[in-house]
C-alpha cells in the first residue's frame, strides 16, 4: 500500500478547518484507512501566485525544503489544494535539471537539508533516485482507492442533489505537468460526485477560472469577483444545489465573492466534505460555520424537507 | 467594472492613444532578452494570432488583451507593459492555445519579476512574505478559526507548536540566503 503525507497548505488549516477534518476522516479508520502521516515541519508550499511570480529561486528553495521532508520519510505528498499541487509538482520538474538541483542544494545545505529524490534499487548495485511524488487528493481517491471502494463506503447516498463541479485551473493546466485527468474534458470529480449518489450537472464554461488565482484576488478583488459572478450565473442556470471543488482557494473565492453580488448564494464545499457527507459523517464535524455562504438550503434539501 | 479597470490597468489604452507617436527612446530593444532571463520564452517568436486573447478570461472582461501585451513586449515598451502583470490569473489557457508555444502566462510572470526588481512591489506580496516568515504560512492564523478547530477536535495548527520555531529559523535563513527579504523589503524578524 502506498504511504502518504498530508499536505494541507495554508488556506485549509487557517480558514476552512472543516475540510481538514473531512480529509482526515475519509482517510482514517472510519473511511479508507490509508497509511497517511502528518509532517509538522511542512511550511507553505509556497504559494505560486506570490513566490513563483516574484522570485523563482526563493520559490524553488522553499518548495524543495518541503519535498526533502517527504523524501526523508519516503512518502508521497497528498495535497488537498490545486495551488500546492502545482507549486510542488512544478518544483519536482525544475529539480530534474541537475544544475537547478545543485543550486538549491547549496542553499539548503545551510539549513542541513539535501534533495536527491527517493532512492530505489536499480540494476545490480546501482541506486536510482525518483522524484518525490506529489499527488492531488482526487488522484489518490480515484486511482489508489478506486471507485468501487468509494461506492461501497457510501452509506447515505446524496440523492436528488444537483452538483456543479468546479475543477480549478491548476488542476488542469499547464498540461506540461503530468496530468492525472483529461485537461480538456476532466471527469474524475464528476465521477466521485456520482459515486456519492448525487447528479453532476453540466454548465456553460465549466472549465473557466474562478477569478482568484495568480494574485488577482489580492490585487483587484472586483475583477476576481466579476469572473466568479459569470461562473455563478452559469451555475444557477443549470439549477445546481451546490458547488463542489477540489481546491480550497477556489472555494474561498466562491464563498467570499458571492456576497458581493447576491444575497443568498450557492453553497460551496470541498469534494472531501461532500464525500464525507455521503459516508455518513455528522454534518457538525464539517465546519460549515466557517463558510460565508450558508449551506442550510443544501442540507434541507438533503434531508428531503 | 469601471472602477476596477481604472485602478489597475492605469488606462493602458488611454495612454497609448494620448501619445500616439511613440518615439524611439521609448523602445527597449533588450526587453525581450530580459524576459527570457526570468523564465519567459522569446516573445519575438509571437505570431500575433490572438488565440491567447480569445481564451483569456480576463481579456473578456476588461481592457487587457494578452496579444497586445505580447506586442508591446516585442517593441520593448516597458512603460505600457509593466503595470498589467498582476491582472493575469495564471490560468494557463493561453499556454494551451499558443501555436508558437510561447506561454504568455510565463511571460506575465517574468514581467512580475522585472517589475518587482524595479521596486514596484504590490502590498499583498509583502503581506504574504511577512506571514511566511512569521508563521511559516502565507495565510495568517485566525483566532476564531482556532476556536472552531478546537470544537472540531483538531489539533492546533503546526505553526503553534514550540518545535515549529526551528522551521521558522530555516525559512528565515533561506529567505536571507536568496536575498528575498531585501528584494521585497521585509524585515526577517517579521515586520513589514
Image (cartoon, rainbow, N blue to C red):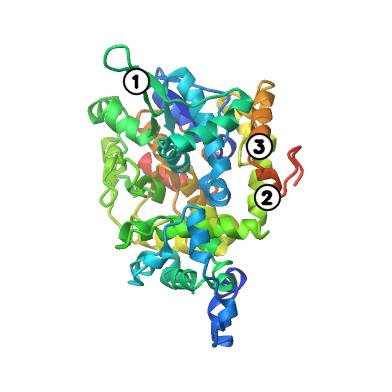
Chain to which mark 1 belongs: A
**Image location (x, y in percent) of residue A284:** 50, 32
Q: What's the residue at 26%, 16% (across, down)?
A: A123
Marks 3 and 1 sit apart, C-alpha to C-alpha, by: 36 Å
**Residue that badge 2 annotates:** B184
Chain to which mark 2 belongs: B
Give SS at disc 1: loop
Marks 2 and 1 sit apart, C-alpha to C-alpha, by: 40 Å
Q: How many marks?
A: 3
Q: Nearer the viewer, residue B57 or A110?
A: A110
Q: Are marks 3 and 1 on the same chain?
A: no
Q: Is residue A200 left or right of residue A71?
A: left
**Image location (x, y in percent) of residue B43:** 42, 64
Q: Are marks 3 and 2 on the same chain?
A: yes
**Residue that badge 1 annotates:** A2
Q: How crowded is the residue under tag 2: few (<14 C-alpha within 10 Å), some, or many (20+)? A: many
Q: Is residue A62 left or right of residue B59?
A: right
**Image location (x, y in percent) of residue A62:** 56, 36
Does residue A192 appear in this view? yes
**Residue that badge 3 annotates:** B177
Q: Is residue A223 left or right of residue B136?
A: left
- Quick one: label 3 or label 2, which is nearer the N terminus? 3
- Please state which of the two labelled residues, at mark 2 or mark 1, is closer to the viewer: 2
Give SS at disc 3: helix
Q: What's the residue at 29%, 32% (across, down)?
A: A142
Marks 3 and 2 sit apart, C-alpha to C-alpha, by: 14 Å
Amino acid at each position: 500500500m502506498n504511504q502518504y503525507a498530508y499536505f494541507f497548505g495554508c488556506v485549509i488549516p487557517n480558514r476552512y478547518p472543516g475540510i481538514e477534518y473531512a480529509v482526515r476522516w475519509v482517510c482514517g479508520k472510519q473511511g479508507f484507512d490509508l497509511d497517511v502521516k502528518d509532517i509538522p515541519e511542512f511550511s507553505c508550499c509556497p504559494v505560486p501566485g506570490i513566490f513563483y511570480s516574484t522570485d523563482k529561486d526563493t520559490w524553488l528553495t522553499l518548495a524543495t525544503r518541503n519535498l526533502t521532508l517527504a523524501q526523508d520519510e519516503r512518502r508521497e505528498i497528498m495535497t488537498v489544494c490545486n495551488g500546492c499541487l502545482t507549486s510542488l509538482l512544478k518544483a519536482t520538474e525544475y529539480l530534474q535539471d541537475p544544475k537547478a538541483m545543485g543550486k538549491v542544494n547549496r542553499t539548503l545545505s545551510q539549513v542541513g537539508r539535501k534533495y536527491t529524490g527517493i532512492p530505489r534499487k536499480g540494476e545490480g548495485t546501482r541506486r536510482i533516485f525518483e522524484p518525490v511524488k506529489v499527488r492531488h487528493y482526487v488522484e489518490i481517491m480515484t486511482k489508489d482507492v478506486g471507485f468501487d471502494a468509494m461506492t461501497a463506503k457510501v452509506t447515505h447516498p446524496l440523492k436528488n442533489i444537483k452538483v456543479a463541479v468546479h475543477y480549478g485551473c491548476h488542476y488542469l493546466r499547464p498540461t506540461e505537468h503530468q496530468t492525472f485527468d483529461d485537461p480538456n474534458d476532466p471527469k474524475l470529480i464528476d465521477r466521485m460526485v456520482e459515486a456519492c449518489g448525487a447528479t453532476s450537472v453540466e454548465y456553460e464554461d465549466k472549465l473557466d477560472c474562478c477569478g482568484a488565482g495568480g494574485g488577482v484576488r489580492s490585487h483587484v478583488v472586483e475583477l476576481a469577483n466579476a469572473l466568479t459572478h459569470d461562473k455563478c450565473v452559469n451555475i444557477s442556470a443549470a439549477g445546481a444545489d451546490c458547488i463542489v471543488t477540489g481546491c480550497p482557494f477556489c472555494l474561498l473565492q466562491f464563498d467570499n465573492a458571492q456576497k458581493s453580488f447576491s444575497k443568498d448564494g450557492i453553497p460551496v464545499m470541498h469534494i472531501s466534505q461532500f464525500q464525507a457527507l455521503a459516508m455518513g459523517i455528522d454534518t457538525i464535524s464539517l465546519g460549515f460555520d466557517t463558510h460565508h455562504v450558508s449551506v442550510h438550503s443544501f442540507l434541507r434539501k438533503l434531508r428531503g424537507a | 467594472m469601471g472602477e476596477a479597470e481604472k485602478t489597475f490597468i492605469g488606462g493602458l489604452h488611454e495612454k497609448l492613444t494620448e501619445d500616439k507617436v511613440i518615439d524611439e527612446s521609448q523602445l527597449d530593444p533588450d526587453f525581450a532578452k530580459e524576459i527570457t532571463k526570468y523564465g519567459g520564452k522569446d516573445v519575438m517568436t509571437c505570431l500575433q494570432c490572438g488565440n491567447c486573447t480569445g481564451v483569456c478570461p480576463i481579456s473578456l472582461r476588461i481592457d487587457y488583451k494578452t496579444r497586445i501585451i505580447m506586442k508591446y513586449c516585442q517593441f520593448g515598451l516597458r512603460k505600457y507593459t509593466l503595470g498589467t502583470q498582476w491582472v493575469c490569473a495564471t490560468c494557463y489557457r493561453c499556454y494551451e492555445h499558443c501555436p508558437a508555444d510561447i506561454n504568455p502566462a510565463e511571460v506575465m510572470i517574468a514581467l512580475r519579476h522585472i517589475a518587482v526588481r524595479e521596486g514596484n512591489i504590490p502590498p499583498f506580496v509583502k503581506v504574504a512574505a511577512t506571514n511566511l516568515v512569521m508563521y511559516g504560512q502565507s495565510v495568517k492564523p485566525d483566532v476564531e478559526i482556532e476556536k472552531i478547530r478546537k470544537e472540531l477536535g483538531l489539533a492546533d495548527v503546526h505553526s503553534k507548536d514550540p518545535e515549529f520555531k526551528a522551521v521558522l529559523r530555516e525559512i528565515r535563513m533561506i529567505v536571507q540566503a536568496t536575498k528575498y527579504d531585501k528584494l521585497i523589503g521585509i524585515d526577517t524578524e517579521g515586520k513589514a
